[in-house]
Image: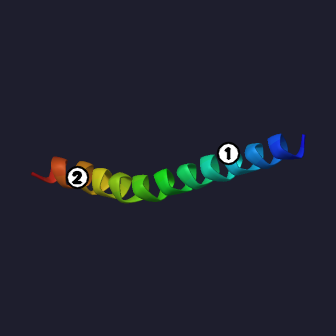
Amino acid sequence: MTGLIKSDGLLLMRISLVRVSSMLMALPNISTLLTMSKMGPRR
């Protein structure tokens, strides 16, 4: 049982890390999209 719990904890840690990394990677993309949408109508 302890082994399963440990593996589950590692999986949760990995999933949370992936979510955080994806969020951080998405932030610059969102900012660029916002700037592009703002610059678009001006042209």
Under circle 2, the secondary element is: helix
Q: Which residue is mark 1?
A: 11
Amino acid marked by disc 1: Leu
Amino acid marked by disc 2: Met
**Could you tell me which residue is drawn at 17 percent across and 48 percent down?**
40
Neighbourhood count class around disc 2 (C-alpha, 10 Å): few under 14, some 14–19, many 20 upward = few
**Could you tell me which residue is drawn at 32 percent across and 53 percent down?**
34
Quadrant in which the N terminus appears? top right
Colouring chosen for the image of the structure: rainbow
Residue 41: x %, y % from top left: 17, 47
Residue 16: x %, y % from top left: 63, 51
Under circle 1, the secondary element is: helix
**Could you tell me which residue is drawn at 56 percent across and 56 percent down?**
20
Neighbourhood count class around disc 1 (C-alpha, 10 Å): few under 14, some 14–19, many 20 upward = few
Q: Please indicate whether residue 38 sits to the left or right of residue 6 in the image.
A: left
> Which of these two is toward me, 31 or 3?
3
Q: Earlier in the sequence, mark 2 or mark 1?
A: 1
Q: Which residue is mark 2?
A: 36
